[in-house]
Image (spheres, rainbow, N blue to C red):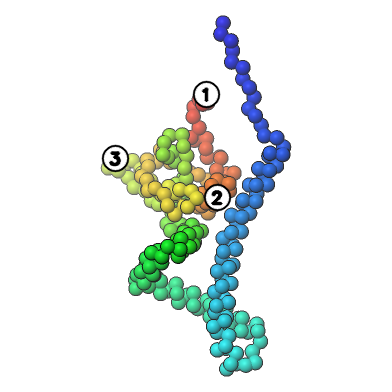
Amino acid sequence: MEAEAVKTPAHKPGAWARFRTHIRNRLISGILVLFPVGITYLVLKFLFNLASGLLKPMIEQPLEPLPDWAVALISLVALGVLLYVVGFFVGQVFGRRLVAFGERLLLKVPILKTVYGASKQTVEVFAMTDRDKFESVVLVEFPRPGVLMLGFVSGTFRDPSGNLYYRMFIPTAPNPTSGFMAIIHEQEVKPAGITLEEAIKMIVSGGLLGPETLGQQLGAFAPDKPVT
């Protein structure tokens, strides 16, 4: 008789290792949450100080004496008007062309192209201006069977035989603004059971912020027999 293989129990990390992993994951989660908030605060603070510095002399001279809170309030309103004007200008054809021309110039300067490119990519990741165009978040086996990826459904269509297909965008981590466009049969698509915001957080964090509800949908992809 052949000797039976001795099965060794899987090694489980100790309490200290689990504690360190828990602390590390929570710290990373906190950074991922506070980072965009901090960037937003710094940008708004810079714009506010810029607007306040430019407008303060013009406001104080004709309206002197003027309380500091009034100067801050007028500067804040002026900042809102400025942001609206810039946004309106960029929304026009001429504005978009001018911004594109300026970006091409910046991307030709060695140091500036790195700083500007990274900043723009970060903003695009958290903004995702096309998120309203996506209908739902699904799970698909991509790029091969057994490997699951999140997909954003952008639409559906039927072939002449009546089969339903999904048009979808499969994002890559940690930048969900890049990825693959795929057309997949309805039988190969399963709902992920999470929102688009949860999916984006999961992708940007490399899976560290994955919602627990995602696991409830994985049974549809489980193999019939355990992998040995």
Picture coordinates of residue 192 (x, y %)?
Answer: 50, 44
**For this view, does 24 lie left or right of residue 223?**
right
Q: Nearer the viewer, residue 67 or 154?
A: 67
**Marks 1 and 2, the one that precedes in the sequence:** 2
Residue 18 drawn above or below residue 128: above
Most distant residue in the right direction: 15
Toward which corner of the image does residue 62 lie, by quadrant?
Answer: bottom right
Q: Mark 3 sits on what residue?
A: 161
Residue 128 percent across, percent down from the top left: 47, 58
Q: Give the CA distance from mark 1 to mark 3.
A: 39 Å
**Are the two marked residues, 3 and 2, in contact with CB atoms closer than 8 angstroms?**
no
Disc 2 target residue? 205
Where's residue 210, x and y in %?
57, 46
Residue at figure coordinates x 61%, y 17% from the top left = 6
In the structure shown, which secondary structural element does the residue marked by tag 1 occupy? loop
Task: Locate residue 214, reporting x and y percent.
Answer: 55, 43
- Which quadrant would the N terminus be assigned to in this image? top right
Q: In this view of the protein, can residue 96 be seen by the observer?
A: no
Circle 1 is placed at which residue position?
228
> At 49% across and 29% down in the image, what residue appears?
223
Q: Secondary structure at mark 2?
A: loop
Label 1: how many Cα within 10 Å (few below 14, some 14–19, many 20+): few
**Total number of numbered discs in the rendering:** 3
The kind of residue on which mark 2 rests is Ser
Mark 1 or mark 3: which comes first in sequence? 3
Which three-letter amino acid code belongs to the residue tagged 1? Thr
Q: Amino acid at mark 3?
A: Ser
Could you say which quadrant of the image residue 216 lies in?
top right
For disc 3, the neighbor class at 10 Å (few under 14, some 14 to 19, many from 20) is few
